[in-house]
Amino acid sequence: MGLEMIEAAGLTKRYGAKTAVHDLTFEVRPGHVTGFLGPNGSGKSTTMRMIVGLDRPTSGTVTVGGRPFRQTPNAPRKVGALLDAQAVHGGRSARNHLLSLAQLSGIPASRVEEVLDVVGLRDVAGKRSKGFSLGMGQRLGIAAALLGDPQVLLFDEPVNGLDPEGIYWVRTLMKRLAAEGRTVLVSSHLMSEMAVTADHLLVIGRGRLLADMSVREFISRNSADFARVRVADDAAGRTGELAAAVAEAGGRALKEPDGALRVTGIDLPRISDLAHKADIRLWELSPHHASLEEAYMRLTQDVVDYRSTDDELAGFTPPEDEAHPLDTAPGPPEVPEVPAQGWYAPPPPGQAPPQTRSRP
Amino acid sequence: MASAAAVLQSEWTKIRTVSSTTWTLISVFLATVVIGGVISAVSNSTFGDLSDVSQTTFDPTLTSFSGMVLGQLAMVVFGVLVVGSEYSSGMIRTSLAAVPRRATFLFSKIGVAGLLALVVGLITGFVAFFIGQALLGDHSTTIGEPGVLRAVIGSGLYMCLIALFSMGITVMLRSSMLSLGILMPFFFLVSNILAAVPKAKDVAHYFPDQAGQKLLQVVPDAANGGGGSYGPWGGFGIMCAWVVAALIGGYLVLRNRDA
């Protein structure tokens, strides 16, 4: 079985004056789930479309198993792609949609039933895909990608619109496919999703490659744990003193805007000891983890194309108050008594919540 | 590569599993046969009112095909939808990701749809002819007369070419709405109006539909037929040239543009 890699070299795509993808060079290796991360509009989809030959690169090349996709013999048996789950004719049933794709590459019709079972769509296979929910559409798209039992799989935002169970299923599926020695490239804009799915990360922003490393490396580089230390208000002037003590003990202390210290390099008991020795009372000493999400946001914050600003409602005048005579001005709103039951933490994945346990 | 046979089979599955195929092709048949029948019956009952010239150049075969003016529009819709639905649904990206070779994809699709259009066109042509002749009564002709069989088969070829031309245009424009918006008025109005205007006539005779309709004509100077300096097969050739041009244009667009 040949090891099928996706290799991009100097891949560039321009649409008029806008450069969607700029000089990307990377490899996607078999046996791993490679996460392809970037904010909206960063060029993930464009890159994936170039991989399967839908878009022509302005310059550079991308090959699958050493060949440009357009020249790949019997492509559907080599490469399966979910690029746009909505890209189906709504008037055709799921089964017929898959059948037409199966026939393209000499895949037996019985395989259609197999993938329908794999994605859990058998019950609705005869229905027109027009009536499918977003999640069902995603499942149909995944079924189409799996049809040819391909060595290389591309998934563009596969968990869009899926319910938690579906997300868990996709995650397991990706990992299983990679464990079978396949090359799996999954795009997402959710770092948290990739952290639990992918082994390797490609991070892009504005079409440029920002990181190409294993998830473990990404975590160790980007998620420094730290302690937040707050000195008692009446001793606020001694914060600098504590910072000096921390530095002396080999740690690093940064002052946060609200006066607290962010300490890295030494652990919490040690900080407590230092404060005690200096006779400084602490009001806070708490452990913090910079999440992967934060690390990713930091990495991409300069390259986000679509950023929201506060809604200032500039042109709006506040509604006239005349309708509310003063004597009926509302008092503080009454908080309705909410029964505490019904509020419980969601169960960990794969475990049924106790109250829905099935009875024999 | 995905073999042409596999792609043909897949395209056949695609075309038979959407209801628009059935509806447009039924419309082709009904519009052509029913309107052709009505006009044949009316011609039969009002034959005496026609001028002498009209009476001597009366073409019973062409009269029974009168419904094709509308029937061909349904055929245009068929051709446009077969290709255009790939674009409007986004299915084109799924299709091309599965069949990266543009030529295999396009010509399989067009081959399947064209063959289907030809079969439906031929059935429609023969049924319209026989019903029309039955209703024309004394003024009818028979399939054995010189040129008549050629005209009836020609009606099927004409329908097929109309569908192929529409497909080529739609691949170029990559949109059903745009293609319908251009092709429908063209075939229904522009072409017919220009063909009746003295000067523009000389140009309009080389339009695909005007040229192709020559093939349906048995009496060369029929009052309701076109003019032009070419015979039935010349007209067919001109129409084929249009179709080939549209398909080549479509192929070049498909090959060179991002899907």
Image: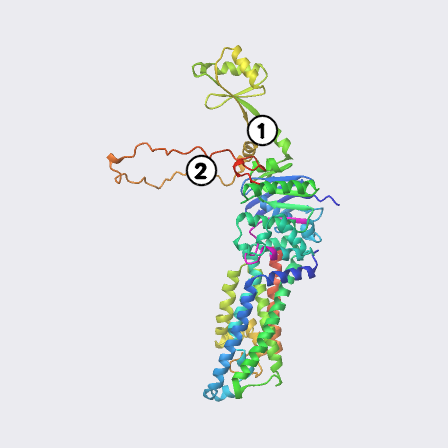
Whether residue A57 is visible to the viewer of this picture, yes or no, is no
SS majority, magenta:
loop
Circle 1 sits in a helix, a strand or a loop, which is it?
A: loop
Q: Secondary structure at mark 2?
A: loop
Q: Earlier in the sequence, mark 2 or mark 1?
A: 1
Q: Would you place residue A332 above or below residue B92 in this image? A: above
Q: Amino acid at mark 2?
A: Thr
Q: Which residues are magenta?
A: A79-96
Relative to B49, is B4 on the left or the right?
right
Outermost residue, front side: A360
Quarter of the picture holding the N terminus of chain B: bottom right
Across and down, in percent, residue A205 comes to 57, 39
Q: Which residue is identified by label 1?
A: A223
Q: Which quadrant holds residue B153?
A: bottom right
Mark 2 vs mark 1, CA separation in Å: 27 Å
Residue located 58% across and 72% down the image: B159
Mark 2 lies on residue: A309
The image position of residue A64, as x and y in percent, is 69, 47
Q: Position of residue B59 (x, y in %)?
A: 54, 83
**Which color scheme did the rendering employ for the protein?**
rainbow
Along the line of sight, the residue nearer the viewer: A152 or B131: B131
Dot 2: few (<14), some (14–19), or many (≥20) neighbours within 10 Å? few
Q: Is residue A86 above or below residue A222?
A: below
Chain letter of the residue beneath label 2 in the structure image: A
The crowding category of the residue bearing disc 1, from other C-alpha atoms within 10 Å (few below 14, some 14 to 19, many at least 20), is: some
Q: Do circles 2 and 1 both sit on a common chain? A: yes
Residue A295 covered by magenta stretch: no
Q: Is residue B152 visible?
A: yes
**Which residue corresponds to the image point at 58% horizontal and 52% vertical from the top-left?**
A123
